[in-house]
Image (cartoon, coloured by chain):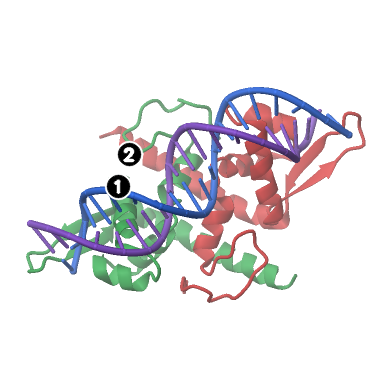
Chain colours: A red, B green, C purple, D blue
Amino acid sequence: MSDFKSGQYGTCTLTVKHACPIELTMHIIGGKWKGIILFLLSQSPMYYNAMRREIPGITQRILTLQLRDLENDGIIEREETNDNPKKVLYYLTALGEDFVPILKSIETWGNAYMSKQKKN
Amino acid sequence: MSDFKSGQYGTCTLTVKHACPIELTMHIIGGKWKGIILFLLSQSPMYYNAMRREIPGITQRILTLQLRDLENDGIIEREETNDNPKKVLYYLTALGEDFVPILKSIETWGNAYMSKQKKN
DNA sequence: CGGAATCCAATGTGATACTG
DNA sequence: CAGTATCACATTGGATTCCG
């Protein structure tokens, strides 16, 4: 059973400390664009600029911040090429891959939600 | 496939408009305490004050706000009793119930995440 | 190309006191 | 009991400019 009382799990090495696994997960993947980023990376690894193009409306700063968060939380990894100018490839870690099925169910639920709302 | 381009799904009746089902879902259940609230309500319907007791650290204002959000988004419903003083029972809608399995997988993933982090 | 720096706006959350 | 009202604060996201 989930336990969300404070300090239950002691100190962990996260960006932000959370006692409840649900809260923790929500925080890790709860950024405004993180769902989209994970969705893109679930299809294939992707270069920084390709992601920018695929996410209309995001700024460089925000994209970088969200990528950093995900990297620090162990969901994605980055790999620089030796090209000039260099390119940076982002891809899911094993932990990130494990989350993909959940992302899929979230997508399914969201779509069902949308069709229901439309009928109102 | 998921499509996150703006305006893709036209106007919906949500608190906040979202084009992508993933973004949409994240926003609906992404509030700081919404995961916990849904977890509690997944166990059984619950009165307002009982929820307060079960969520240490939340203020009345925030609890009410988060409950309102979930209610407006069709995830939970409220029912007032005729007692004096009156009590208010909160419970999941069908849409909310549909989300419970996802909440469970999120909890599972979060727990796995925590144990991996501990080993570092 | 893939950022970092700076500054600012919007949103979300919290403390406290009060009420039908 | 189940809220509101006010105010304050923190976090997040965004616009713009500059750099190796």
At horizontal 50% and vertical 43% (from top left) the residue drawn is A107
Front in this rendered view, residue A47 or B85: B85
Query: Which amino acid type is marked by label 1?
Result: Gly
Chain identifier of the residue bearing label 1 in the image: B
Q: Residue B105 placed where, x, y %? A: 52, 61
Left or right: B55, with A95 as reference point: left
- Quarter location, residue A53: top right
Question: Is any part of residue B75 visible from this angle?
Answer: no
Residue occupied by mark 1: B74
On screen, residue A38 above or below B51: above
On screen, residue C9 above or below B117: above
At horizontal 63% and vertical 40% (from top left) the residue drawn is A37
Residue occupied by mark 2: A116
At horizontal 40% and vertical 42% (from top left) the residue drawn is A112
Left or right: B77, with D11 as reference point: left
Find numbered disc 1 in the image and state the secondary structure of the residue it sits on: loop
Q: Residue C18 placed where, x, y %? A: 17, 60
- How many tags in the picture? 2
Query: Which amino acid type is marked by label 2?
Result: Lys
